Image (spheres, rainbow, N blue to C red):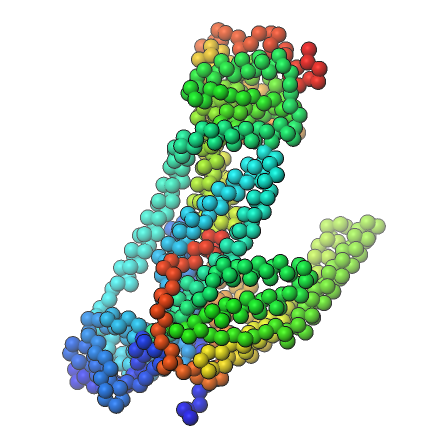
Amino acid sequence: MTELRADRPGRFSDGRSAGVRKVVVRVLATGMEIRGIDGFLIAVWKTEDLRADGDWPEMKGVRLRCASEPDARLAVEDAYFIKDALPKVDEPRRRRIGLILGALLGAGVLAGLVLSLPMASRLAASLVPAGMERDWGRNIAAGFESQLRVCEGKAGRQALEGLIARLAEGLPADRRSITLHVIDRPDVNALALPGGDVILFAGLIAKADSPDEIAGVLGHELTHIGRRHVSAAMIRGMGVGVIATLITGDASGLVASGIGAALAGAYSRDDEAEADRGGMDLLERAGIGSDGMITFFRRLEDMEGKPGMLTQWLGTHPEAGARAAAIAALRRPAPHLPSMDESQWRSVKAICSKSPP
Amino acid sequence: MSEPQSPRPFTQSGGTLAMIRVALVNLGLSMVTLSLWRFWGRTRVRRLLWGGVSAWGDPVEYTGTGKELFMGFLMVLVVIYLPLALGFGWAQTLTAAGDPRGPLVISLLYFVTILLVAAGLYRARRYQMSRTRWRGIRGGQTGSALGYAARSLLVWLLLPLSLGWAWPWGEMMLARYRFNHTTFGDHPLSCDAHAGGLYGRFALVWLSGLGFLLIAGFAVWVAADAASIGQMDETVATGLVVVILLMVSVIVLALPWAWYRAGFYRRLAGGLSFQGARFAADFRTARLIRLVVGNMLISLFSLGILRPWAALRTFRYACSAIQVEGVPDFDAIHQNTETGPKAGEGLISVLDGAGEF
């Protein structure tokens, strides 16, 4: 114990200026006194306030701090023994475990976010004002129409619009106003835009063998509109971006867009399956039946096998075969009402010809 | 007069093995936490980097925390990233709709993003300086992040206009702004370095760049010629050109550039002074090349995992090269009342995820 009470030379910075001065440190039972070499008392540090601050290798000493003077720094020569007198702090270890637990918790929260994202984005989509959604969809449709040729066969349009009105009966009241756009492109595809615009490509009409098949596609797209899938997908895409940025810390794009594309694909498959089922409901309400939808999916599946065919529907509506099987399992009673009559169907087929019949 | 001081008051005595250990532990923890550990990991690396440095016999400390980095990141994610993502999304739908405002908004947003990156770099420096202490006294970074961003923008605009000749001036102007606004305690550093004497070295860089372009053009022409008359296979010719150009670029581009960089850092250090002490540094071209090539190899072969080791090498080299004539009057430097930003570096960690360490 006598050694503990001996005076030790040291270096001291008071935390008010950047100067350093030589001091003499005397260890007492309750703490330590720091005096100038002239013996003038500079500070008294209590044992319970002392904090270890690493080693002072050159002088075989230790560095110390004091909780009541956090800016001051003290280094004491030949004083490794002081370490034993310091209050035992197991804080770092406990804090480290806390940090690791916290980070694991954070990872859990992230995983939860990924799982709840589809629901959350649908909820958010239902909060988007209908007028805003409508404007947005109209803008996109106007973009298509300004850059591509629009099919204007009058009778064909009337037949399709009549069919759409019949199917839309099954949608919520505020989502029934649908605008149809027929675009003269060979793509076998149809698009639902946010709000209430549907785009049909001529290629799809050409590939369809019966009006019931077109009705199936329309039922599918109308369900997308009724359930605001496009807005939800936009919001989801943003959420995926945020989560990917959280994980990678990289908003500059590469990683985020990769993860985004992967997640978006997984999520959109759910949307497509839901639109298939919803489309069947719409068909049934309109009394059309789902055989047309099933045969059309089967045809798409055959096209998947043939190389070189322009089948964009498959890019945006993947796994036609599996989906045909899924709806076939839900197959409803045989059709009792035709979706349109023969002359209407002929005018639909001719909707894009330059001189309408 | 006081006793003669060493003209090289800085040393970095941190061990390579300790740093590699921290880097590997960080890698493991980052993997189990979906990378959320990175904020705390980066903090641990900085503690080692800063803590290994001692100046005039006293150690430097890094007092930042992982929590501060994490909070800064979250804040920027919500306040900056989400609005930007929304803006880009909106502009893309405008573009898709053929609206001429779309591309305009996109270029405007790119412009804002670039400004934010520059401002973020400055803010990150402000955070790091405010978390740096020596003898208990805080460092700091005054000045305006947006002002710095505006100056950076000016340099980027002048670069193409001057065919690159604005670079030494611009680079030095920005460095001067950074250092003139760097403080220790209540006193700023002062930097009067100018690019005037650097233009000789830069001319060599510029001319060798031009020469390289000519060589590259000639090599491509010869190879294309050889391939067209069937002397050489086309892929072989392409590969040969790439290999030859890579080897030539080491001599023609990298050597003059390293010579310029060494000159730049030497001038920058020579222009620094603090409280009556003048800085200098004997950065040498060969040492610089060794440092940079070594760091590149370390980062490359460890897939970036051992970047902390590369940073340690940089710290070591800088400490060994910096000289200070005279000792600043440290007794006259008092604690900085500014405690710095509460959260750290969000802007730059979101917009440029690939942080240094």
Q: Quadrant of residue A110?
A: top left
**Residue at the image point whose x is 60% and y is 36% from the top:** B99
Q: Is A148 placed above or below B251 here?
A: above
Q: How many marks?
A: 0
The foreground one among B212 and A136 is A136
**Residue at the image point whose x is 71% and y is 18% from the top:** A354
**Residue at the image point whose x is 48% and y is 25% from the top:** A225
Please state the horizontal and vertical placement of residue A90, each as a whole percent of the image.
25, 64
Q: Is A177 placed above or below B313 here?
A: above
Q: Quadrant of the N terminus of chain B?
A: bottom left
**Residue at the image point whose x is 44% and y is 67% from the top:** B141
The foreground one among A198 and B46 is A198
Please state the horizontal and vertical placement of residue A210, each as a whole percent of the image.
58, 13
Please state the horizontal and vertical placement of residue B294, each as a whole percent of the image.
55, 67
Q: Quadrant of residue B285?
A: bottom right
Please state the horizontal and vertical placement of residue A337, each as a whole percent of the image.
50, 7
